[in-house]
Amino acid sequence: MMMASSPDTPESPRSERRWLPVVIVAVLLVVVAGGARSVADATATNAGPVTMGSVRVQPPEGWQVEGSASPTSVRLHKGPVVLDISVGQPVAGGPLLLAALYREQQLATAFEHLLPGAPEAFALTSGVPAARFYYLAGTADGVILDGFVVAVDAPDASVVFDVRAPSTGELTDVLEDLRTMVEGASL
């Protein structure tokens, strides 16, 4: 009987030790991932009011500025969702032409594949004319993005809001934030 119990005793510590490296690796992964997120949060600044020339936009809570705003553009992000805001001179052809120019000069050159919807005209609650369209874009490395553009053509400036996300659900989650920024922008 002593022989039978001897082999069982050494196996128990071995099986317990086999889990120890797995637990250590799992803890390290959690620590590294948490540290990377902390570094990303620490290096990004919370978005207060953003001013580009004569245009001022107030991003809702949770949006962060990437880099710094220039007189003509700023990039914001909320998780994986990116919002580019571009400011320029008014366009003689109005917001539909502004949307078409942005699609051809910016989106078509930035992405490997682009499937834009047709721009539709509308007016902000303030009466300022605007246009909007959805698009799907494919990057050179195969990432598919769902995007939405709002082009606003005010008397003193034109503004393009281009928001995009790697999946449909994420874009849908921020459309209310976008509406708030577009409607609340001082033009």
Image (spheres, rainbow, N blue to C red):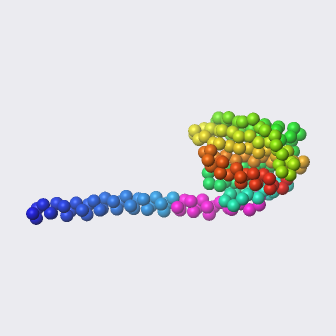
| Percent position of residue 135, x then y | 69, 39
The residue range painted magenta reads 34-50
Residue 34 vs 148, above or below: the answer is: below
Residue 53 can be seen in this image? no
Tell me the residue at 46%/58% (across/down). 29
Rendering quarter of residue 67:
bottom right
Left or right of 49 on screen, residue 63: left
Residue 51 vs 90, above or below: the answer is: below
Tell me the residue at 71%/52% (across/down). 176
Is 16 one of the magenta-colored residues?
A: no
Quadrant position of the N terminus in the picture: bottom left
Is 46 one of the magenta-colored residues?
A: yes
| Percent position of residue 49, x then y | 77, 60
Residue 163 can be seen in this image? yes
| Percent position of residue 39, x then y | 58, 61
Residue 68 vs residue 142, the one in the foreground:
142
Left or right of 97 on screen, residue 62: left
Tell me the residue at 62%/63% (across/down). 42
**In the image as oriented, which residue stretches furthest toward the front?**
125
Residue 152 vs 7, above or below: the answer is: above
Rendering quarter of residue 142:
top right
Tell me the residue at 67%/46% (across/down). 164
